[in-house]
Amino acid sequence: MRAVRRTCAAASVTMPPFLGRRGRLKVCFMSVQNRKFPIPLSYFSAPLGMFALGLAWRYGAAAGLLPAWAGEGLLAVAFAAWLFLTAAYVYKIAAFRADFLADVRDLVQCCFISAIPITAMLAGLSALPYAPVTARVLICAGAAGQVAFSMYRAAGLWRGLHTVAATTPVVYLPTVATNFVSTSAFAALGLHDFALLFFGAGVFSWLSLEAAVLGRLRTEAAVAAQVRGIVGIQLAPAFVGCGAYLAVNGGRFDVFAMMLLGYGCLQFLFLLRLLPWLGEGGFTMSLWGFSFGLAAMAGCGLHLLAAGRLPALGLAMAAAGSGFVLLLMAGTLRLMWQGRFLVRG
């Protein structure tokens, strides 16, 4: 209740004196409930990308390709951002219930709920060398959470509740990204059979969605300029899937791994050609939709370098993926400096 009073004071909510103390607090609470929360759910894409790149750099350090401080430092930044956003979203559920329910009901925004268990698992992987028990709890909780949410959301849409317009690359998050990250996480815990189960779930979910997503992008109205960055999620499945596959096959670049790399590189070239169109709305936080795929591309490039396979391609992938994510971080700091990070509403 004290938090509500402080929020009301900050919002300058004007209430008539005849309502009394309880009445004023009730009106104030209703006003807070109807306001727009200034941190959208899609902002979880930022720690998602930073975690993925930090873990890629950690692998690079283990392979003798990068200094250890780079990956660990980035993981620390990602962990801090994740804690902040998680706390903010818990507050949103409590104090901005209408906004939270709107997220759940929205066919596009609801998919970003999957970023919460995904980042929890990535946080667990980041913490694994330092706090193994906590890491296991985060990974298992994240895996259970992602399965529960996909049962609710993805299976729920089988009743004819989805639309063609909402079939953007963001639909990969609840069943593809979640299961590929679960694969890598359980492989890191040594639970190889469980990792393979998640990998199969991710691969066939990806195959079932790919044609529908690309068909929508080709034939329906263009995604709005301000949120066009979500198209960048199209980069993720191949590279994140390749990283997951390397986690369960011992890091070998066999035929299937190279096929995944080839398709991922093709998607990168397609998106590179579309950069002017994707950037028509200027720099917005939606561009973090690229980050998971870019970070995974960097990780696959470092794996190529460590394996001595196609070193020129590996170096290009590692440099491009890392460089673009660092540009996203710089752009976000600029938004903060300009006071445009929070959504006004």
Image (spheres, rainbow, N blue to C red):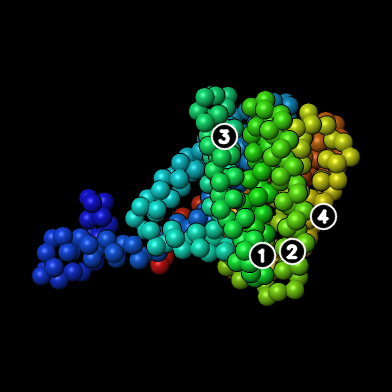
Q: Count residues near mark 4 (Cα–Cα under 10 Å), then give few for <14, some for 14-19, many for 20+.
A: some
Specify whether residue 26 is in view. Answer: yes
Q: Decide: marks 3, 2 in contact (CB < 8 A)?
A: no
- Amino acid type, residue under disc 2 in the picture: Ala
Q: Quadrant of residue 97?
A: bottom left
Closer to the chain start, of discs 1 and 4, is: 1
Q: Nearer the viewer, mark 3 or mark 4?
A: 3
Q: Position of residue 284 (x, y in %)?
A: 56, 61
Q: Secondary structure at mark 1?
A: loop
Which one is nearer the viewer's eye here, 59 or 136? Answer: 136
Q: How far apart are the alpha carbons under marks 1 and 3?
A: 28 Å
Q: Secondary structure at mark 2?
A: helix
Q: Quadrant of residue 282?
A: bottom right
Q: Position of residue 78 (x, y in %)?
A: 53, 41
Residue at 40%, 67% (x, y): give it: 345
Image height of 14 relative to 201, above or below:
below
Residue 139, labelled with which disc?
3
Closer to the chain start, of discs 3 and 4, is: 3
* Residue under label 4: 266
Which one is nearer the viewer's eye here, 228 or 302? Answer: 228
* Residue under label 2: 212
